[in-house]
Image: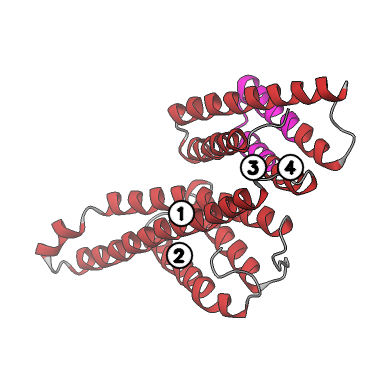
Amino acid sequence: MQVPAYLYEIILLLYAASIFSYFIDFIQKNRKANVFAFRLLTLVWFFQSLFLLQEMIAHAGLPVKDVYEGLYFYAWVLVSLSLFINRIYKVDFLTFFLNVVGFFMMLLYIASSAYEREWTQTIPFMNEVLIAHITLAILAYGFFTLSFVFATMYLFQFQLLKQKKGYRWWTRLGDLGKLETYTFTSITIGTPLLLLSIVMGIVWAYTTTAVFYWYDWKTIGSLTVLAVYAVYLFLRLARGVRGKGLAIYTIAAFLILIINFFLLSTFSSFHFTG
């Protein structure tokens, strides 16, 4: 019996929410986010296990006879390992990236096998993947825009305090510490959204007739934007960089984002948003 499309969509939604929560926990050491992510991933594993058992009964063995079945089993193994590592060893960094790879494999399996088996809902499903890809990218850009605004306010407030001028603006702009926190929070939310968007975009491109190249300007630009904001998180968390320097970096990162969104898109053979 073929698994309904909406069940696969539920799994992907749960998986994406789990990855997002694991990222929040990885960055902020948020115990509630970790517990929530673990529970979501457990649900993913439960559904995957049911479908895997169904395939094993249907094929009288492990479903690994072709590349599509192998992808599903691979995704299941990664989820199982992720749950085990999170429960026993608490290695947040490894857990997060295992889940990103697992999500990619699961999405690739669903998209690829849909075409291979001539799934009647293939085109609507792939259109939904594309819409999700674009939506997540725009949401990420929205949060990165917020970080730019907060960083700009930080620099303006910093300058006013340094020169001891414009007292009436001080209370309106907010405390420097809060502005820095808001900038960090915006980037913490935007980064995993962009990561998920890129994963969905790559899978969509590989499993449809879309023109896609790794060396396409849009692809390079999107990966560069992701890397730039990942470096921000590294500088703040690993290097302890704070204050004016990090605010300037945030503004520069947003300028790179703008270049990618408006300029590099005109040189791309891929779709406009990504």
* Cα distance in 3D space between marks 3 and 2: 27 Å
Q: Amino acid at mark 2?
A: Tyr
Q: Secondary structure at mark 3?
A: helix
Give the x, y percent position of residue 241: 46, 54
Name the residue that disc number 4 marks: 109
Identify the residue at image location x=35%, y=59%.
146
Q: Secondary structure at mark 4?
A: helix
Q: Callout 4: 10 Å neighbours few (<14), some, many (20+)?
A: many
Of circles 1 and 4, the one toward us is 4
Q: Determine whether label 1 and label 4 are within 8 Å by CB.
A: no
Q: Amino acid at mark 3?
A: Val
Q: Determine whether label 2 and label 4 are within 8 Å by CB.
A: no
The quadrant of the rendering that contains the C terminus is bottom right
Q: Which mark sits nearer the N-terminus, 1 or 2?
A: 1
Residue placed most toward the observer, 46 or 229: 46
Residue 249, numbered label: 2
Q: Is residue 37 left or right of residue 171?
A: right
